[in-house]
Image: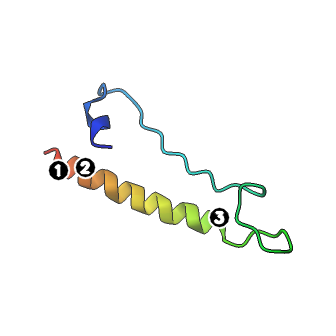
Amino acid sequence: MRSWRRARPDATLTFLCELGPPPYAITGPDGADVPDCWAEALVLQVRVRALWQRVVADSG
């Protein structure tokens, strides 16, 4: 993210977390999804936004 700050002002940084359905998801012995992928994606969104704010603050 720090090196992204040097990108063009009109550039777009896309963060994609792939927490999809099986076979990508973590599944139990019965084949059902174990985690709540939507909740996990929201947690990642909060963390990534916080990291971005740190990068912005550190670059002055």
Q: Secondary structure at mark 3?
A: helix
User: Which amino acid type corresponds to the residue marked 2 in the rendered image?
Assistant: Val
Read off the residue under disc 3: 37
- Mark pair 2, 1: CA separation: 5 Å
Dividing the image into 4 quarters, which one contains the C terminus? Answer: top left
Where residue 44 appears, x then y in whole percent? 49, 60
Read off the residue under disc 1: 58
Read off the residue under disc 2: 55
Dot 1 and dot 3 residues touching (CB under 8 Å): no
Count of numbered labels shown in the rendering: 3
Task: Check the image and report above or below for 8 versus 58.
Answer: above
User: Which amino acid type corresponds to the residue marked 1 in the rendered image?
Assistant: Asp
Dot 2 and dot 1 residues touching (CB under 8 Å): yes
User: Which amino acid type corresponds to the residue marked 3 in the rendered image?
Assistant: Cys
Front residue of 24/60: it is 24
- Mark pair 1, 3: CA separation: 31 Å
